[in-house]
Image (spheres, coloured by chain):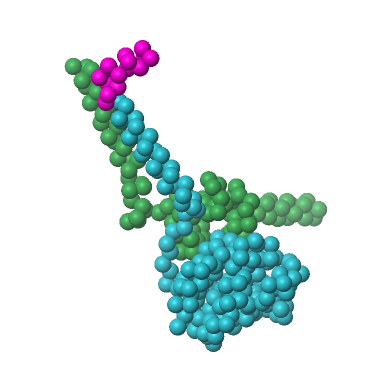
């Protein structure tokens, strides 16, 4: 107690204590704010480039198909990168099934590093929302799209990506897609 | 005749090794300069995440297609933004990044210089 009394008398402590308190409060606030955010930094990329050109194998028929054949004839497409081993893909599947009812948009699946048998089982179990499914067995096509992993969705209007959804679809992104697709 | 054959084989082997080594070096050099976006504090070269494995394949593919190192960086920058490069290029958005350390260094030097002068006096 004597020590505390001594400290209180010291003028320097009167100045130092508030500084320390403010300092720790600031640090606390930075951590509090910082840790609430996701720590994966996703830069805003406004790209006016056309969607990438690629060649791949169509899942159902095993035929080779080019991106031009896939993305022609319709105004709006949703490219959905998915895999049967991806747990969040199960969560977003309901939204894809709902979106299938919208006739203005075609959903294209890009099957990411998956086994055909497992992928088919996944679709049998949860339903198949895809107009076409393309295979991306080594993940290189996803990189060409600028994707981070599964699941990820790209809303395409006239050969340009107008919206990119990283992670599973949710209520708000689903509504936004419906709003954008007119 | 035997000696000539042997010589040809040796030359081919040497050239083969050289071209191969060059390829490996450039692809690993490029991937060391790329940030693995889904990992923390790792380059694409060091990471074994799905993202990094695919990106390495893409870089190798682009080298095979004859793209230069700079062109590959530009290609990935369009797709993923400046953040993917460990060594971002100097532009309007990044000039503070480049000049702040230099500025701090000069200010620090000035402070030391001033202090020394005071001590001398």
Residue located at (80% from left, 55% from top): B1
Q: Is residue A3 above or below residue B103?
A: above
Residue at 59%, 68% (x, y): give it. A92
Vertical position of residue B20 compared to residue A169: above or below: above
Residue sitting at the far bottom? A73
User: Which image quarter is the C terminus of chain A in?
Assistant: bottom left
* Residue furthest right in the image: B2
Q: Which residues are magenta?
A: A1-15
Q: Please tell me the colour of chain A.
A: cyan
Colour in which chain B is drawn: green
Q: Could you tell me if residue A161 is visible in this image?
A: no
Magenta stretch: dominant secondary structure: helix
Asked if the stretch drawn in magenta spans residue A4, the answer is yes
Verify whether residue A160 appears in magenta.
no
Q: Residue B74: percent from the left, percent from the top?
A: 46, 61
The quadrant of the rendering that contains the N terminus of chain A is top left
Q: x, y (%) of residue A54? A: 59, 74
Whether residue A3 sits left or right of residue B10 in the image: it is left
| Image coordinates for residue A119, horizontal then vertical, percent | 71, 69
Q: Is residue A16 visible?
A: yes
Q: Nearer the viewer, residue A18 or A154?
A: A18
Q: Identify the residue shown where x is 30% and y is 26%.
A: A16
Say which residue appears at 43% left-offset and 64% top-offset. Answer: A45
Left or right: where B117 falls relative to A108: left
Nearer-the-camera pick, B17 or A142:
A142
């Amino acid at each position: 107690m004597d020590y505390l009394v001594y400290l209180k008398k010291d003028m320097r402590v009167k100045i130092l204590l508030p500084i320390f308190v403010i300092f720790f409060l600031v640090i606390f606030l930075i951590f509090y704010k910082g840790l609430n955010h996701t720590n994966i930094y996703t830069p805003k990329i406004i790209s006016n480039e056309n969607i990438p050109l690629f060649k791949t194998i169509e899942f159902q028929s095993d035929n080779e198909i080019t991106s031009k054949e896939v993305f022609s004839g319709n105004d709006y497409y949703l490219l959905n990168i998915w895999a049967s081993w991806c747990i969040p893909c199960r969560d977003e599947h309901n939204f894809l099934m709902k979106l299938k009812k919208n006739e203005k948009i075609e959903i294209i699946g890009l099957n990411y590093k998956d086994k055909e048998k497992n992928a088919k089982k996944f679709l049998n179990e949860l339903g198949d929302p895809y107009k076409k499914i393309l295979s991306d067995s080594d993940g290189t096509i996803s990189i060409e799209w600028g994707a981070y992993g599964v699941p990820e969705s790209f809303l395409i209007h006239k050969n340009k990506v107008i919206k990119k959804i990283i992670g599973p679809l949710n209520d708000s992104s689903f509504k936004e897609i419906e709003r954008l697709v007119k | 005749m035997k000696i000539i054959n042997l010589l040809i084989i040796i030359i081919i082997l040497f050239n083969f090794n050289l071209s191969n080594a060059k390829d490996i070096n450039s692809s690993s050099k490029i991937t060391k300069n790329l940030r693995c976006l889904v990992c923390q504090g790792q380059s694409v070269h060091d990471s074994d995440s799905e993202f990094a494995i695919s990106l390495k394949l893409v870089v190798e593919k682009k080298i095979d297609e004859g793209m230069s190192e700079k062109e590959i960086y530009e290609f990935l920058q369009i797709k993923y933004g400046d953040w993917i490069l460990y060594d971002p290029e100097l532009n309007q958005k990044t000039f503070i990044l480049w000049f702040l350390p230099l500025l701090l260094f000069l200010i620090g030097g000035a402070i030391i210089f001033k202090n020394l002068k005071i001590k001398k006096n």
